[in-house]
Image: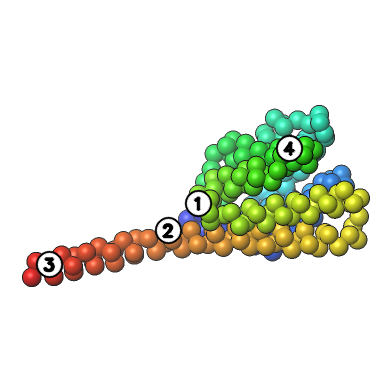
Amino acid sequence: MSAKGERFAFDPVAVGRSECQAWVGYYRRDWPHMLVGALGMVRHGFALGPLGNVKAAWHVMRANQLWAPYPDNDPVAAQQHMARFYRMAKQAGRLNVDPQVAAELEVAWWQAHRQQQHDAQYGEDVLLASLIRLYCYLYRANPDDVRRAAQLRVEAMRLSDAWVVAGCHLDDLTLARERLALVASFTALREASDRRALGRRFAPLRDQEWGEELSTDCAQEVT
């Protein structure tokens, strides 16, 4: 919901493409490129205004810079930057969350993905579960409603990992498949968010109709 009570609906195509660009910048350690991708994600995903978009994107980039080194990264500082990002989204009325909790859940899936990348004993189940927990919290959704979105994002990570192993070449066709998977993921997430919003909007009407049906049934029983 927005600060004025109007629901903000993100652009899943633009967000998916922007995240792909951000991932490319991250793995090539091309931070200006990643910042552009993060800016697209914030602009099309949260619309915080010209200055707010830049500031929020900078926090996302700094979080990723602090997370990037392996194994000596700084997850605490990364989480702090993500909490600042989520605080901005909350202040703008885009999300109704505790910024600290949201940041913890965000960095949790980063950790799950890193474990999967570097330790064969970790499968995709932990990563999938961590994404579902994040989506459930951010969008107040049921796990089944966001599972498809999480599965597609895990698939995009699988493609990204293969692209990294192959050398991070910009002409690698794997990037196109990764981009499509991310667009599909955010499309599924948008659909889940829309279904939940519609359910909340029409719930009072359904309750009223159900009450009227009960009243009619009761009257018939009496007569």
* Label 2 or label 3, whichever comes before in sequence order: 2
Q: Disc 1 versus disc 4: distance between alpha carbons?
A: 28 Å
Q: Nearer the viewer, mark 4 or mark 2?
A: 4
40 shown above or below 26 = below
Q: If the image is split into quadrants, where does the C terminus sit? A: bottom left
Say if mark 3 contacts mark 4, CB within 8 Å.
no
Q: Residues within 10 Å of mark 1 (few under 14, many from 20)?
A: some
Instruction: Check disc 2 and give the amino acid type.
Output: Arg
* Label 1 or label 3, whichever comes before in sequence order: 1
Name the residue beneath numbered marker 1. Answer: 142
Q: Disc 1 versus disc 2: distance between alpha carbons?
A: 13 Å
Secondary structure, mark 2, is: helix
- Which residue occupies 62% across, 43% down? 130
Does residue 135 appear left or right of residue 53 in this picture?
A: left
73 shown above or below 59 = above
* Label 1 or label 2, whichever comes before in sequence order: 1
Secondary structure, mark 3, is: helix
Say if mark 2 contacts mark 3, CB within 8 Å.
no
Say if mark 1 contacts mark 4, CB within 8 Å.
no
Q: Disc 4 versus disc 2: distance between alpha carbons?
A: 41 Å
- Which residue occupies 61% across, 39% down? 105
Q: Would residue 44 be seen by someone viewing this image from the given angle? A: no
Name the residue beneath numbered marker 2. Answer: 200
Name the residue beneath numbered marker 4. Answer: 121
